[in-house]
Amino acid sequence: MRITAVVVIVGLLAVSAVACDSDTSNDGAARVVATTTILGDIARNVVGDSAEVDVLMPVGADPHDFQPSAQQVAAIQRADLVLATGLGLEEGLSDVLESAAADGVRIWEVGPDVDPLRFSESADDGPNDEDHETGDFDPHFWLDPLRVARAAALLGDQLEEIAPGHDWASGVDAYAAELAAVDEDSIEALTVVAPSDRKLVTNHRSFGYFADRYDFEVVGTVIPGGATLANPSSAELASLVATIQREQVPAIFTENVEPDVLASAVAAEVGYDVEIVELYTGSLGERGSDGDTLIKMLESNVARIAGALGAS
C-alpha cells in the first residue's frame, strides 16, 4: 500500500494542502504530521521510502514557544496521525492538539509512552531550580538513544494500525540497531570524562535523560524549570555562579534553539575561564550541519561534551 503524508512546509503550506487533499481523495492514503524536527526524523527513519514525513516546526524553532499558523492548524485537523512529544513540550500547540483530538484526529504523544523521568529522577535538579515542582515529567527523552529506539517501535505499532499489512518492522529494527550503536559509541567516547568531572551546567533542564543514561549530574541550569520560557532572577543567577565556582565546572552548555546571552553573562562572573559550548536540544541543525539528523545530533553532543569536560 502506498502511503503519502500531509506536506507541511513553511512557505508552501497552501500548495501542500491542495496536493494532500487530492492524494487522499484519490487513494485514501494516510496523512501524518510530526510537530518537531526530531520526531520527524524518527518517523523518516521508520518509514523509509514508504511514506513522506513532514514537520510543523522549522529547523531551529524552540518547541516550548512555537505558535502554529492557521494553515498548520488546518493541516493538523486533516491529519490521520499527529506525532507530538507531549509532557508539556509543545506548549504553544497544546490547545490546538486538544481540539484536534476532541474532533477525532489521532494524536499520539510519544513522551508518556517511553518510560519518562520526573525531573527529580533525571539527575537534573540544579540548585537554582528549588522553587519548581519536582513531580513534572521531563519531555526531552530523545537525548537517550535507547528511549528513541522504544519510540520508533511504538511508532511502528501506530503505523500498523493506520496502514496494516506493510512491513513497518524492518524500518524499526534497522533504526534501533543504529541507535544501539550510537549508545555504545557514546559510552566509549565519554570514558575521557572522569566520574568526578561528570558535572553539567546547561541552559535549561533538558539534559536529564542524557545524565541518567551516561552517569552525569546536572548541577545547575541558567534558566530555571523544564521550559525555556522562565526568566531567572538575579539571586538564581548568583546562586548558579556560586555553584560553578564550588564545583569548578569548566563549561556551560547552551542550546541551538536559544541565545547564549545569559549563559555568557554567568560565565563572565565566575572568575575563571568558562567555555560556552552549544549543543543540539529541541531541534535538529540546518541541512549539512553535524546535527541535521537525530543520530548525528546525539553524536555531536557527545563529542562536544567529551571535548569540554574530558581529560586534556
Image (spheres, grey):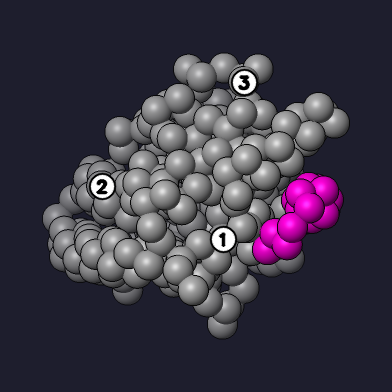
Give the structural element (helix, strand or loop) at label 3.
Answer: loop
Amino acid identity at mark 2: Arg
Give the structural element (helix, strand or loop) at label 1.
Answer: loop
Q: Quadrant of residue 172?
A: bottom left
Give the residue displayed 74% in from the left and 58% down from the top: 272
Q: Looking at the image, which is closer to me, 160 or 179?
A: 179
Coordinates of residue 5 in the picture (x, y in percent): 44, 59
Coordinates of residue 301 in the picture (x, y in percent): 49, 64
Q: Is residue 260 magenta?
A: yes
Q: Quadrant of residue 121?
A: top left
Asked whether the beta carbons under mark 1 and mark 3 sit within 8 Å of each other, the answer is: no
Coordinates of residue 219 in the picture (x, y in percent): 55, 38
Amino acid identity at mark 1: Tyr
Q: Is residue 185 above or below residue 132?
A: below
Tell me the tag on residue 130. 3
CA gap between label 3 and label 2 equals 31 Å
CA gap between label 1 and label 3 equals 25 Å
Farthest bottom residue? 288
Give the residue displayed 48% in from the left and 17% down from the top: 135
- Where does label 2 land, which residue? 150
- Asked if one can make out residue 247 in the rendered structure from this viewpoint, the answer is yes
Q: Is residue 297 left or right of residue 129?
A: left
Give the residue displayed 76% in from the left and 49% down from the top: 270
Q: Nearer the viewer, mark 2 or mark 1?
A: 1
Q: Is residue 211 left or right of residue 241?
A: left
Q: Is residue 66 above or below residue 305?
A: above
- Where does label 1 land, which residue? 280
What residue span does the magenta drawing correspond to? 259-276
